[in-house]
Amino acid sequence: MSETSPSNNRVRNRRYERPRRVVSWIGVLLGASIGIAGGLLLAWSQPVQEYDTAPWQLDADDRAAYVVAIALRYNQDGDVGGAVQQLIDLRLPGDPIEQMAAIACQLATTGYVDNASGLRAVRAMMRFYQAQGRSGCADQVIAADDPAATAFVDIQAPTSTPTLPPPDTKTPTPDGGVGGTPTPNILIIPTSPPQTDFTFVNAATFCDSTRSGLIEVYVYEVNGATGVPGQAVRARWDGGESTFFTGLKPERGTAYADFQMSENLSYILDMPGRADPLAQPLVAVTCTTPEGQRAVIGYRVTFRALE
Amino acid sequence: MKRFLLSLLAALVIGLVIGLYLGWVPFPVQYVDSPARDLAQRYKDEYTVMIAAGYQADLDLTGAVERLRVLGVENVAQHVQEVAERYITTSRDVAEIQLLVVLAEGMGRLTPMMEPFRPVTLPGQGS
């Protein structure tokens, strides 16, 4: 038998006398937490169709393309404010104009500048950032001024197929007649496009410790066999450039010219004003010769005259 | 217990709706490293105008086509034509329309709608 005190009964009765709440706050709290978490998880994790992408969300390559477009537009309309605002909108880290210089540098040292369009684009970027007092490695790799297609230079070029002097005859020809020795012709060649006098034919690599890091260039006539001496070939790299000429090493033939690379640098090769640059830079990586010696890879590059 | 379960269920549904709203509207997933083909149409148009400006400056059609290829459009000339016509029909900036028309014409996509926006050479100008 248990006895219940009057006070205990009062307490119990009071509990049942309280009006019941419609909701369970613990249930609401728990349900809402789980619901919101589940909703966010669903919204963020389910595959969505990407849309409304802004330029700042682009990957590095396409953002570079966008920067190029900004520079091209600036070159057309000269609107510095608009160009800067677009660069800011791209949310490039740090100084946006310096970032443009960095992108120009990157493009100038890759195959991007292997054609006239790429060169023009990088020059457009250079004009923009240089006007804002910035500089970049592109300034060293390529010249800022785009030589106008109408600008001409006079160069002395030997005749393409030197002939031997004719044997003496009993009736000497008067002076000023048709000579046999190579006669320097005055050629007028545009310094800018079209650069189609010669075309790149091929590039082969070799690994030879005696010719470590050498770029061997051969420039031939259209027949692919007759060398063309006196042709300027240019190698450009990050921080410099060098021009060298065919035919200066007669023991290697009139078509031959060479250039010594430094290890781990990339080089862009072209015939300035006469052939477009190679599509790929030549990279001076190390290699191991068949004899097991360490050397820097060499390249054998051939250009041929167009008809 | 019934009261608890009902409250839990109701709150779960409401919470789910709130969570989806938060995840889609105020705090949507923002992708980075996206390709240019996913650009919003207005940015694609803006990019096309910039390339058209470059084309007007250098008349390098190959370069313009190559640069527009990053947009992932199947037919670059068709894309330029569409953008030019959209700019005309939506009364956008005339200078931008003219840039697009020059590029469209360069690509052989000059349509009657574009004719009035072609650059003209007045007597005494040019050669």
Image (spheres, coloured by chain):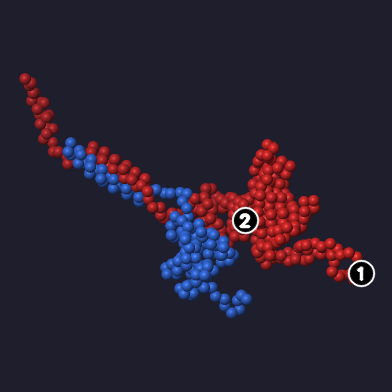
Does B96 sit above or below residue A203?
below
In depth, the one of A26 and A109 nearer the eye is A109
Chain that the image shows in blue? B
Horizontal placement of A56 versus A27: left or right? Answer: right
Whether labels 1 and 2 belong to a single chain: the reply is yes
Disc 1 residue type (three-letter): Pro
Residue at image mark 1: A172
Horizontal placement of B84 versus A165: left or right? Answer: left
Horizontal placement of A121 versus A165: left or right? Answer: left
Q: Say few, some or many: other residues with alpha carbon within 10 Å of mark 1 (under 14 / 14 to 19 / 20 or more).
A: few
Q: Say few, some or many: other residues with alpha carbon within 10 Å of mark 2 (under 14 / 14 to 19 / 20 or more).
A: many
The x, y position of residue A247, in whole percent, is 77, 55
The residue that appears at 10% across and 29% down in the rendered structure is A10
The residue that appears at 68% across and 65% down in the rendered structure is A307
Mark 1 or 2 closer to N-term?
2
Residue at image mark 2: A114
Q: Quadrant of residue B87?
A: bottom left
Protein chain holding label 1: A
Disc 2 residue type (three-letter): Asp
Chain that the image shows in red? A
Protein chain holding label 2: A
Q: Residue placed farthest to the left in the image?
A: A1
